[in-house]
Image (spheres, grey):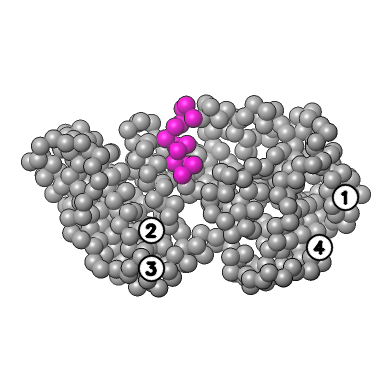
């Protein structure tokens, strides 16, 4: 049976920095501490940091081969741990592709936690790395990008198509969704028969109207950028559209930022003065150091961090928030609305990232949807939810009401 949770201990180093380099990685059962796999590789001439990243990559690859669902990655490299946790920038261009590769591997698991440990608690991986460095010093110089080899084959584990592997993949998928028990679309009763909509809680998801940052193609997260003139016109048109879709609404709930509250107030007015309730969990992702920067500026100044962020929803912008964290609070908000307004219609005014994440969960889709789904400013999406977890996505990014603007 494949282990659900494993510990990866990884290390790497070089005799000279750069110099003859190698790495070591150990995979342990998180409950028993039993060694499940070892990896070690001489990588020619490289730096300490390159070798450390190579050790982490090898350990994550071994954990994936074992069918693990969750990983705790432990290293005595403060730099790698902080960079992979999204707290430090990746300034060296030689490390950015390695960080992106590690982030891509981390995305295969339901959860990956990075932790720093003292060197004396990383002795096993350190010994493997030192042996690899010794071998690198004796061998002719060669490239540091050759694929790793297994110096001690991993013990036999469940085959790729075995029931144990299937159970691990299912567990990973459930943990990645992390929705409240009984409301997970992936586990709701399947049916081809249309459900009666009058028994559902209907959420009308509205992205706020345009701002100056929208037109300038800038990252717009927690900064309180107001609607532009065009954005206010979009809000009015959206209000009329929502009033036509749902003449009876129990509540209008909004992100606390003014671009959303202004859109929400226009909608509430068109509905006869429904009070606007603010919900902090619906706020946009915190883009940290990227806030207010253009997409091109971020690509130029943080290329490695951007690649890592695009590769994994667990990676946060420098000083910001990961999409995993955004998704968790959005699920909390949606669950709260469904409990508070069972069988009623609620207008939810939020931002592009929260709405994409809500739709991803409603469709039981993967993270690739986030990069393939386009949501216009003032676009409307509609979904119905039932108490047993059933979900019907009625429409996505309806913009017919904006055609005349």
Quick one: 182 or 370, which is closer to the camera? 370
Q: Quick check: 5 left or right of 354? A: left
Q: Is mark 1 on a helix, strand or loop?
A: helix
Single out the mark in the foreground, 3 or 1.
3
Residue 136: quadrant of the picture: top left
Q: Which circle's residue, 3 or 2, is located before the other in the chain?
A: 2
Q: Which circle's residue, 4 or 1, is located before the other in the chain?
A: 1
Q: Quick check: 337 left or right of 404? A: left
Residue at position x 20%, y 48% in the image:
41
Residue at position x 32%, y 48% in the image:
57
Circle 4 is placed at which residue position? 344
How far apart are labels 4 and 3 at the CA level?
44 Å
Q: Which circle's residue, 4 or 3, is located before the other in the chain?
A: 3
Circle 2 is placed at which residue position? 71
Task: Report the label total.
Answer: 4
Q: Give the range drawn in magenta.
A: 299-311
């Amino acid at each position: 049976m494949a282990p659900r949770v494993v510990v990866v201990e990884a290390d790497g180093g070089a005799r000279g920095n750069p110099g003859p380099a190698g790495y070591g990685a150990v995979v342990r059962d998180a409950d028993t501490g039993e060694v499940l796999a070892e990896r070690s590789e001489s990588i020619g001439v490289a730096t300490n940091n390159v070798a450390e990243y190579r050790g982490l990559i090898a350990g994550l690859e071994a954990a994936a081969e074992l069918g693990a669902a969750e990983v705790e990655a432990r290293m005595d490299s403060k730099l790698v741990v902080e960079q992979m946790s999204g707290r430090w920038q990746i300034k060296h261009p030689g490390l950015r592709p390695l960080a992106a590769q590690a982030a891509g591997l981390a995305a295969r698991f339901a959860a990956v936690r990075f932790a720093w440990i003292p060197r004396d608690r990383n002795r096993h991986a350190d010994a493997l790395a030192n042996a690899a460095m010794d071998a690198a010093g004796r061998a002719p110089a060669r490239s540091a990008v050759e694929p790793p080899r297994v110096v001690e084959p991993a013990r036999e584990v469940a085959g790729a198509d075995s029931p144990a592997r299937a159970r691990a993949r299912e567990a990973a998928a459930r943990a990645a969704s992390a929705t409240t028990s009984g409301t997970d679309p992936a586990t709701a009763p399947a049916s081809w028969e249309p459900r009666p909509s009058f028994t559902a809680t209907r959420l009308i998801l509205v992205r706020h109207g345009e701002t100056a940052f929208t037109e300038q193609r800038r990252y717009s997260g927690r900064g309180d950028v107001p609607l532009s003139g065009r954005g206010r016109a979009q809000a009015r048109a959206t209000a009329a559209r929502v009033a036509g879709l749902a003449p009876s609404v129990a509540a209008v709930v909004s992100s606390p930022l003014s671009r959303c509250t202004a859109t929400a107030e226009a909608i509430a007015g068109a509905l006869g003065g429904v009070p606007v309730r603010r919900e902090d969990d619906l706020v946009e992702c915190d883009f940290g150091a990227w806030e207010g920067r253009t997409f091109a500026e971020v690509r130029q100044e943080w290329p490695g961090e951007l690649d890592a962020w695009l590769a994994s929803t667990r990676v946060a912008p420098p000083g910001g928030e990961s999409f995993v964290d955004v998704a968790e609070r959005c699920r909390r908000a949606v669950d709260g609305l469904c409990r508070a307004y069972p069988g009623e219609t609620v207008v939810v005014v939020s931002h592009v990232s929260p709405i994409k994440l809500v739709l991803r969960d409603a469709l039981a889709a993967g993270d690739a949807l986030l990069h393939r789904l386009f949501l216009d400013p003032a676009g409307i999406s509609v979904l119905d939810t039932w108490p047993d977890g059933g979900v019907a996505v009625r429409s996505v990014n309806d913009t017919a009401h904006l055609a005349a603007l």
